[in-house]
Image: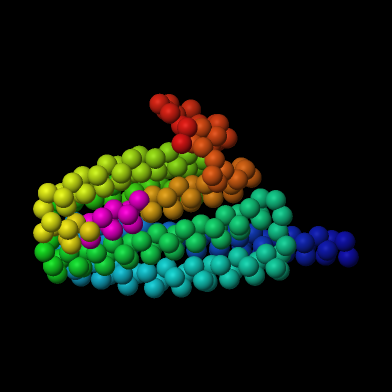
Amino acid sequence: MEFEKDNYSTHISQQFNAELETIRTQMLTMGGIVERQVNDAVEALLTGDVELAEQARRIDKQTNEMELLIDEQCTTTIARRQPAASDLRLIISISRAISDLERIGDESSRIAQQAIELAEGNRTQHGFQEVRHIGNLVRDMVKDVLTAFARNDLEMAYRVAKQDRNVDQEYRSAMRALVTYMMEDVRSISSIMNVIWVLRSLERIGDHSRNLAEHLIYQVSGTDVRHQSLQSIKQMVGSDEDSDSDEE
């Protein structure tokens, strides 16, 4: 009977591991869809491609449905398995991550909507260089943080968190330039406001990407680094990367 009990325990453990891997895989799949949505939305804005913008908006429904599905699976697994230690951290981090992924999808949908409005109205040239630059930064952040999740790579997660500071700096600089443009030409206010909303969404995508990096650090290390400075995160992950200042 003891042998049968051990076999039963092993079977339950294998089932549980399979459930955890399924949840993790679905989160990464959702991340891939959101990454594509970000890319499509930014590209649609830069090129004036209305069809691509509509495609980015349609993806939002899919990411919403995936968030609900994965969240339900996380809740069910906690209730049935009562996980502890690293298993519980994995489920909690995924539950937090899908919320940030869904919000990145929402911001991408807003960018796509602004792309449509700009393409159908008076398309300004002001701010597009800034959109391209910041858009490239946040697209790299989304891609890198998903790679970090796939590899459990804390060093890469730290670099994503650090990049958010650069996005914030570029965003503030771009906003100052756009306000100057509007003061110089009041006729451009309407179209520049569309660009401002795009930049705001990109800055938020950067924030959510940093959140994702922090969720991964918690999952792997067990340390909750939310609201901590970059210096604290750097010390926690043991990063050797040089930095001028990690005080923020």
Relative to 187, is 164 on the left or the right?
right
Q: Is residue 200 magenta?
A: yes
Q: Is residue 82 magenta?
A: no
The spot of residue 78 in percent (x, y) is 67, 64
Q: Is residue 100 above or below residue 64?
A: above
Q: Is residue 86 above or below residue 156?
A: below
The spot of residue 5 in percent (x, y) is 83, 63
For the stretch drawn in magenta, what is the main secondary structure? helix
Q: Residue at x 16, y 52 (%)?
A: 182
Residue 40 visible, this angle: no
**Viewport quadrant of the N terminus:** bottom right
Relative to 127, is 218 on the left or the right?
right
The residue closer to the viewer here, 66 or 147, is 66
Residue 71 visible, this angle: yes
Q: Residue at x 25, y 71 (%)?
A: 54
Q: Quadrant of residue 48?
A: bottom left
The residue closer to the viewer here, 81 or 158, is 158
Q: Quadrant of residue 242?
A: top left
The residue closer to the viewer here, 25 or 59, is 59
Relative to 19, is 64 on the left or the right?
left
The residue closer to the viewer here, 184 or 126, is 184
Q: Residue at x 22, y 59 (%)?
A: 193
Q: How is the image coloured?
A: rainbow
Q: Is residue 178 above or below residue 198?
A: above
Where are the magenta residues, as a range? 194-203
Query: How many marks overall?
Result: 0
For the view shown, which residue lies furthest in the right direction?
1
Q: Residue at x 54, y 50 (%)?
A: 215
Relative to 15, is 119 on the left or the right?
left
